[in-house]
Image (cartoon, helix red, strand yellow):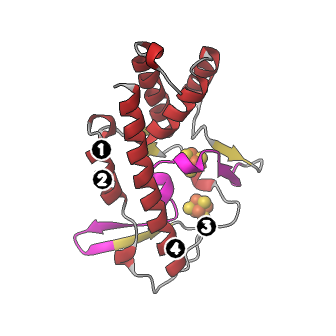
Amino acid sequence: MKLDQYIELSEKIMILYSEMSEHSQKFGQENNLFCLTGCGACCLNKDVFVSELEMLPLALEFYLKNYKNPDKLEQILEKAKNSQSCLFYQKISEDGLSGYCGEYQHRGIICRIFGYSKTKNKNGYQLSVCKKIEKNDNVKIEDAPEMKHYFELIQQLDFSLSQKLLPISIAFSNMLTKIITDMYYERDDLVV
Ligand code: SF4
Ligand code: SF4
């Protein structure tokens, strides 16, 4: 893929992310569902899986900031490969349960629905809410964000990059590696 194609794809993903965040925030406010202040326990989970495509905006930004510094690119790739959980999580307590996302704007689909989301089964929609969030029995489940819906939308942007779900640090590292490889042949044209 060429640089302008990466940029265009990244912009489309960011528009989708912004719509998703708006949807999720509106639902949370209307239904009194809020994360605990300072909590980041979900980011410690080793099972935060995303597609490479979801990491494209972050990997591209990182590449464009650091493409003249191969050591820095190498360091982040090494760190990503060796991370047990998400490498962007910034712990602020010793046990790691308190912290924040160091790349909040670029976080993936699952990261935007850690708190609550709806899923469909044979009985209709059900709401899953993080155990730490105070429950509200009067929730309008049908209005909740649904991972499947947003995942289908992102797949329409690039099917091949969204086929596999991987641990988030690995998905980032794969995406950054792809960008570095593609840009190797285009460096003369790189205008940032
Ligand atoms: S990208 Fe951010 S929100 Fe998602 S798991 Fe990592 S630190 Fe948490
Ligand atoms: S979803 Fe749950 S674990 Fe994650 S930050 Fe919110 S309250 Fe904490």
- Residue 35 is tagged as 3
Numbered disc in front, either 1 or 3:
1
Q: Mark 3 or 4 closer to N-term? A: 4
How far is mark 1 from mark 2, CA to CA? 7 Å
Give the amino acid at mark 2: Leu
The quadrant of the picture showing ligand 2 is bottom right
Residue 43 in the image, given as x and y percentages of width and height? 58, 49
Quarter placement of the C terminus:
top right
153 relative position to 86: left or right: left
**Pointer 3 residue Cβ closer than 8 Å to ligand 2:** yes
* Quadrant in the picture for residue 17: bottom left
Numbered disc in front, either 1 or 4:
1
- Residue 153 is tagged as 2
Answer few, some or many: residues within 10 Å of disc 2's Cα (few below 14, many 20 plus, some between 14 and 19).
few
Q: Residue furthest bottom?
A: 138
- Residue 28 is tagged as 4
How far is mark 1 from mark 3, CA to CA? 30 Å
What SS does tag 4 mark?
A: helix
How far is mark 3 from mark 2, CA to CA? 26 Å
Q: Are marks 1 and 2 in contact (CB under 8 Å)?
A: yes
Residue that appears at 36% across and 25% down: 2
How far is mark 3 from mark 4, CA to CA? 9 Å
Give the amino acid at mark 3: Cys
181 relative position to 98: left or right: left
Q: Are marks 3 and 2 in contact (CB under 8 Å)?
A: no
- Residue 157 is tagged as 1
Magenta region includes residue 29: no
* Quadrant in the picture for residue 121: bottom left
Q: Are marks 1 and 4 in contact (CB under 8 Å)?
A: no
What are the residue bounds of the magenta stretch?
96-125
Is residue 38 shown above or below 27?
above
